[in-house]
Image (cartoon, rainbow, N blue to C red):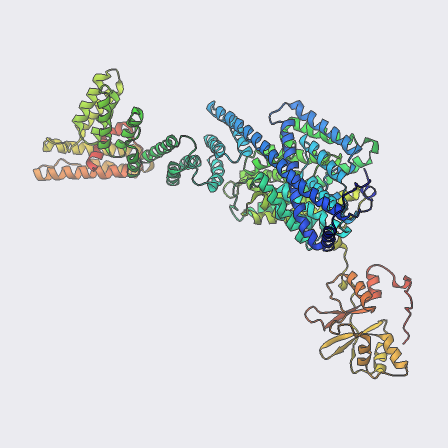
Amino acid sequence: MSDPVAQEQPPLPTATASEFVLTLTLTVAAILLLIIGDTALAKIDRDATRSTAAEEYRVGVNLIAHNRLPDAIEHLRTATTLDRERPVYTVALAQAVVAQGRVLDAEQMLIPLLERDATDGGANLAMARVLTKEGRTDEAKSYYHRAIYGIWPGDAARSRAIARFELIDVLASTGARQELLAELLPIQDESPEDTVLRKRIADYFVLAGSPAKASDIYRDLLRKNPRDANAYVGLGRAALGMGNYPVARSDFLAAQRIAPEDSSIARTIKLADSVIALDPTQRGLGLDEQVRRSRQLVQMTIRSAHRCLDIEAPSVGAALDSVARSLVAPAGVVSRSQAIDENISLAGALWRMREGRCTSRPDDEALALVQDRIAQ
Amino acid sequence: MRRPRLPRLPKRIVGLVEDLRRKEDRLSLALSLFIGALVGLVVVAFILLTGRLAAHMYPAGGLGWRRILVPTLGSLLTGYLLYRYFPLARGSGIPQTRAAVFIHDGRISLRSVIGKFICCSTSLASGIALGREGPSVYIGSGLASVIARRLGLSKTQVKWLVPVGGAAALSAAFNTPIAAVLFTLEEIMGDLHAPVLGSVVLASATAWIVLHLVLGDSPLFHVAGYNLVSPGELLIYALLGVIGGLASVAFVKLLLKLRERFLRFPNSTLWLQPVAGGLTVGIFGFFVPQVLGVGYDQVERVLNGDVILQTVLVLAVLKIIATAVAYASGNAGGIFGPSLFIGAMVGASVGGVAHLIFPASTAGPGAYALVGMGAAFAGIVRTPLTSVIMIFELTRDYTIIVPLMISNLIAFFISHKLQREPIYEALAHQDGLHLPSGPFRTDTALWVTSAIRTPPEPFTLEMKVDEARKLAKGSDLESWPVVDDDGLLGMVRVSDVIDATTGSQRPVTIATILKRARPATHNSTIIPHLHSDQPLGLALARMGDTGHNVLPVVSRANARTIIGVVTLADVLHAYGVDPRRVTPPHGTGVIKL
């Protein structure tokens, strides 16, 4: 190897005043030139890096569409590393990672993004999805709200609507009726020409316990298109929600006349018949019939509760059986009226106890509608 | 070389220039700003050029043969350039910078700077697994040296401006202004209290500002915020310190061993040697592309938790070998970047295993990768303080600082125990250069305490000279302490006491001799003395200053309390010199009592 000691021996030069001034001038000139050069280089570098990142992102998104998640994640990660200025890359990566089931990793990716910009609509929506997956619904709701009121690039209205409907889905699935209604009210008059969207909003109004609003939307839709069988079905469901069972039945029948081949309409008619046959509070029923129906209501509620409570608490199941056995037929008018009230109230109490523990089942639909009607 | 004839300047300007040059301290501070800006811009250009070239030379997803061919050809080209034109541009640049400071009076030639720029750009752009920070330090130091010499500054000023340029370069290369200052003082100067501190800070800050103006405000690595999940994790971080320390030692030993081998080859093969490094990197890169280049993209991925255990383990091993071979074979490039890479991979491996075993009570592997970077840096470069601050600045993540400190210190300790000589010092030794080092000086220094002896019964002010002579009889001490009621007052030569007893005008007391012994100009409140925790070399200096061969050692709590004395003979003995064999200087004889 070379010997640095030997090579670095020349004596130090002594500069004249002119050389001093010249050196300083050259240094300043070099600084100015380098500022220009570096700025140009930095721009070239930035543009090239951004373009590579955009390409990686495009490939990643394409791969997600083809369900090739590991490859997609690889490309999206490269895009994220190359260009940190575009949160959309990190959001896409986080969503791909969530799709792979790595929710905690996705959360870790989104935290710095939200720390940097808490108003980023995309990042908030992604975080809300992650938290929903983790079962942290309450926290997810606040991120959904931030996404709805956050900043979105491009078509912000559409992105906000997507976020709101996702929140509505979450609220509907958790049975949070009041919050669901609060989210539906601001959008009830949105997109009057979008029939699918209007029907979706109307359906959610039924779920939110506001069938009258749903009914208004369906009537409006039927004014525009009287041959819309689905609108009749929706109208019928809204009527069921309002406890107006005969009207519901006639709406379902109207739907069947328009679309006789649709088997789902026949099922809704059957449902309306079941409800009409079960509700003990309908007008025009004799006392005996009311007693019978109220007893049937209790027994059906007990059966429904059995199905899910037996497994987790067999002793509860046994207690329910003893309740069913203790139901006796009362004799006098006063005692029959009292029995109706007691049965209805017992059925209601059992139904509330069942709620939150049992998932809803299709064969409980008529029972649920009657219970809802009585609870109103 | 003939200097170009320059136009004469008006006398007033010449006067101003001369005036400015006379005030060198102020001029250096002002120059620090210029040097900081210039070096910052040059380093930014260096980083951008190497990055862009690398992206073209071996693009991600490119063909496998390209990953073998490009590093091999790149190393062949740089090998020739280094052999033929720029022999000083080989390696990292840190030992060369230190050599410039401590051996060459701050001289680094413009040719070496240009050579370093060209060779390192070629080398790094072709994927050689070396870093860009060490070369940046050399380029920055070289520019500072060139400017200072062209301005006609004194040798001392040129020497002081070299680390100033180095600090500016590191600040811009790593985006770490504080760590750059610390590294310059800790590693290049070997003294945290070096007088260049002000200039170094100014230059580092200026370079950082320039970097931000051109490239924007962005840390080198973006890291998700990590926290200590449970106190028990500290044990795992300590284990990481151990493993990081061992990995550092393995890397340093391998690199030094290989370099020793390469140095044995004939000089005529110098141009070909770097190809060994290029080919090794190329073959590794064919199978594992992440080995190529500086690898900061991969480090960032790992820091953000993108860890596949087998991959990071393989990468740690391959990078150790690739960097060691590339450096040892004489390619141009540094070991800062590879140290961080190796540390991140080792950390991610340890973190990956820990998270697999204790998923609930440990952070993700990314946190360990972060701490591992610091541990490896502390173990390899041996600057523990710099490494803590550097990791903090690189990631701007403060939450992990305690584990980082623990891990760093353990790695540093292990590395110090198993590989006594720090890497830059060892590299300089291999080149035949013996540069000073802080730890080396500390290890071998002798202290006053190693030569201290029990103090004699002191003279008092009122003591008659006959009485004093009797007291000193039989002692080999040539000077004797004098005390009053409050303690030590000074030292008198025994020869003066003897003279006083035999002279015509016989002074009555020791007080008179002590008064005569102190020159009129001498501040009588300053008594020549030593403290037991001072270096023994200082004793020699003080003896020279005062003319006393015996000095009192006094308490730090009360400088008038004598706790012992130190004699010249004892000092020489402590240094291993037999005082009897030392030829006495002029006129020093044996005192006859």
User: Which residue occupies the extreme top position in the image?
Assistant: A261
Tell me the residue at 65%/31% (across/down): B292
Q: What is the total number of numbered labels drawn onto the structure image?
A: 0
- Closest to the observer, B351 or A119: A119
Q: Position of residue A324 (x, y in %)?
A: 21, 35
Q: Position of residue B187 (x, y in %)?
A: 70, 48
User: Is residue A160 in view?
Assistant: yes
Q: Position of residue B242 (x, y in %)?
A: 64, 45
Q: Quadrant of the C terminus of chain B?
A: bottom right
User: Which residue occupies the extreme front position in the image?
Assistant: B10
User: Is residue B245 in view?
Assistant: no
The answer to whether A188 appears left or right of A37 in the picture is left
- Closest to the observer, A137 or A318: A137
The answer to whether A214 appears left or right of B507 in the picture is left
Q: Position of residue B25 (x, y in %)?
A: 70, 55
Q: Quadrant of residue B276?
A: top right
Q: Quadrant of residue B441?
A: bottom right
Residue B126 to residue B458: above or below = above
- Closest to the observer, B225 or B111: B111
Residue B26 to residue A40: above or below = below
The answer to whether B476 appears left or right of A346 in the picture is right
Q: Quadrant of residue A278?
A: top left
Q: Quadrant of the N terminus of chain B?
A: top right
